[in-house]
Image: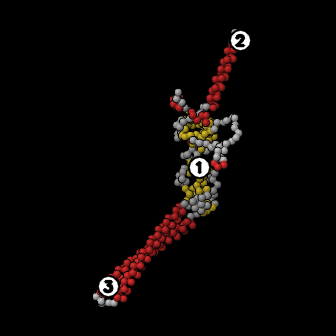
Amino acid sequence: MKTILARLSTLAVVALAFVLGWFAWEHYTRAPWTRDARVRADVVTLSADVAGRIVKLNVQDNQHVDKGQLLLEIDPSRYTLAVEHAKRAVEVSKASLGQSQATIVASQALLRQRQSEERRRRTLKERSAISGEEWEKANTDVSVAEADLLRNQANLGFAQANVQLAIAALAEAEHDLERTRVESPVSGYVTNLLTRQGDYATAGGPLVALVDSDSFYISGYFEETKLPRIGEGDRVAIELMSGERFGGTVQSIAFAIADRENLPGGRLLANINPSYTWVKLAQRVPVRIRIDEDYAGKDKLRAGTTATVTVQQSQNSEDQRYPP
């Protein structure tokens, strides 16, 4: 009797160990969860569009700013003078245009006068009242007046073009003056502020980094063996390493990751590694997770912190994903 009980106990322990081992294997290799997840956010790097010394710095490190808020101002004195110079250039070009237009009116009046004189002299020539030389001189005067009119019309075209160029230069100068004020394009947080008042800003040089407060999401790196049980729209449970817990939704799954063993070789041929690793590790694929909008601690998230993500699936969705 004792022998039978011992055997039954042994079988029960083996069966229990097998079941527990199977659940452990299923949990660690197939269940859709990962400890390799990070809090992510979009970072906007603001650069100077114009060069100059920073005369105002209205933000501090880690400060929250609203969209459209003035962050810093570059010395506008030089750009203000450029605007005034461009305005004077517009006035001069418009004055030149007015002079060209007046010259056109005078040339047209002179041409009409010469044409009238030519017609009168031609009539007198037909009656032999004047010599042919006098008529030829009147005809030449008409040709000269027509040439002057054409030249003045060309000058008018140049004057009109100069006015348009001056107006465009004025618009550019005014735009440069506006760009001396660097405003926040998004609502977010200033991070790692190294710019100081008095620094010289170069065009295109980075000045301020902003973490977009409306762009926080979770990036979970799931093993490829777990991807078949993850789908867009699935609910997930998120736990930060600091202890906060909240929910989210699978937004998308990456379609490609880099293959470090398949770099292009010579002539763009595949570079195949001659050695084969017998122990193959599952690749990790990024999964983007949208954080629930009603999470109260969303404004306390920090990009780069670690999280654990567990995909919560209903039996219906799993049955639909794996039809019998």
Marks 1 and 2, Cα distance to the nearest angstrom? Answer: 70 Å
Of callouts 1 and 2, the N-terminal one: 2
Distance between the Cα atoms at labels 3 and 2?
A: 147 Å
Q: Choose between 271 and 189: the one closer to the eye.
A: 271
- Count of numbered marks: 3
Q: Residue at x 71, y 11 (%)?
A: 2
Which one is in front in this view, the residue at disc 1 or the one at disc 2? 2
Q: Which dot, 3 or 1, sits closer to the camera?
A: 3
> Helix or strand or loop: what does disc 1 sit on?
strand
The numbered mark at residue 252 is none
Give whichever of discs 3 and 2 has the lower sequence position.
Answer: 2
* Rendered residue at 40%/77% (across/down): 149
**Which amino acid is tagged 3?**
Arg
Distance from Cα at disc 3 to Cα at disc 1: 84 Å
> Which residue is disc 2 drawn over?
3
Task: Pinpoint residue 142: horizontal percent, then vertical percent.
Answer: 37, 81
Label 2 residue SS: helix
Which residue in the structure is indicated by mark 1?
43
Q: What amino acid type should be assigned to the residue bearing mark 1?
A: Val
The residue under label 2 is which amino acid type? Thr
Q: Is residue 245 visible?
A: no
Q: Residue furthest top?
A: 1
Horizontal side of residue 321 vs 7, given as left or right: left
Which secondary structure, mark 3? helix
> Which residue bears the numbered disc 3?
122
Residue 311 picture location, percent across and down: 57, 34
Q: Residue at x 59, y 60 (%)?
A: 203
